[in-house]
Image: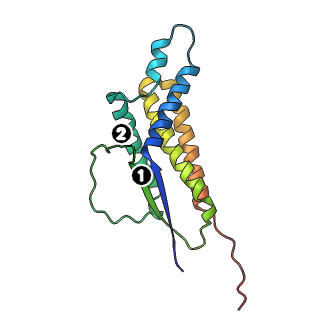
Amino acid sequence: MAKKNVTITLYTSELIYDVQNKTYLTGRSRQTGDNHEQVANMQANDDDENANQVVRSIGNAWATLKTKLSEYIEDTTTSSTDEQMTVTSTTTLQLQLVMPSNYNLATKDTITAALHQYIVNTAIGDWFAITNKNDAEDYYTLAAANLQSIREAINKRVRPTRSTT
């Protein structure tokens, strides 16, 4: 039977925005009195040192995801590098999943959303491991839940129908 190819595209600009927005909201919610410096340090921004850490974390999360999904990915490249990815407003991360013929295509949006959230939550966990250790584990736990959602969605199948011949 023919396999189904499912292409998932994530935009790095959306991933970075989500990391920055969530760290901003977390920092703002932790503000109590005179802890302005602590709150400011929680928030990822576009300054070079912050952006480099966020991009590196996104790259690491992406590599981990590809390992976790490797049985569904057909990759014919034979080389790799540890050079940090270059991010522009149009940079994308793309996966070509090779799924069984009875894979339920209705779950592709769930997989896309969970992939996005896994990368964001892992990157925020990495960020908070440096800037606010108390919150880091919460985001790693969320990333583990996102991975479970990916596994569930990727294993959904279409119910067979009886042939009329």
Residue type at mark 1 is Leu
Name the foreground residue: 76 vs 85. 85
Q: What's the image's color scheme?
A: rainbow
Label 2 belongs to which residue? 56
| Left or right side of 85 for 14 | right
Pick the residue in front: 66 or 96.
96
Residue 158 versus residue 15 in the image, above or below: below
Quadrant holding the N terminus: bottom right
Q: Residue at x 43, y 28 (%)?
A: 44
In the image, residue 28 above or below residue 48? above
Q: Which residue, given by chain and number where applicable, does mark 1 sit on?
A: 93
x, y (%) of residue 19? 48, 35
Image location of residue 7, percent across then percent down: 48, 61
- Above or below residue 21? Residue 2 is below
Quadrant into which the C terminus falls: bottom right
Name the outermost residue toward the top: 34
Q: Residue furthest front?
A: 89
Q: Position of residue 36 (x, y in %)?
A: 49, 12
The 10 Å Cα crowd at callout 1, few under 14, some 14 to 19, many 20 or more, is few
Q: Residue at x 47, y 54 (%)?
A: 9
On screen, residue 160 versus residue 71, left or right, reads: right
User: Label 2 amino acid?
Assistant: Arg
**Callout 2 secondary element:** helix
For marks 1 and 2, give the one nearer the viewer. Answer: 1
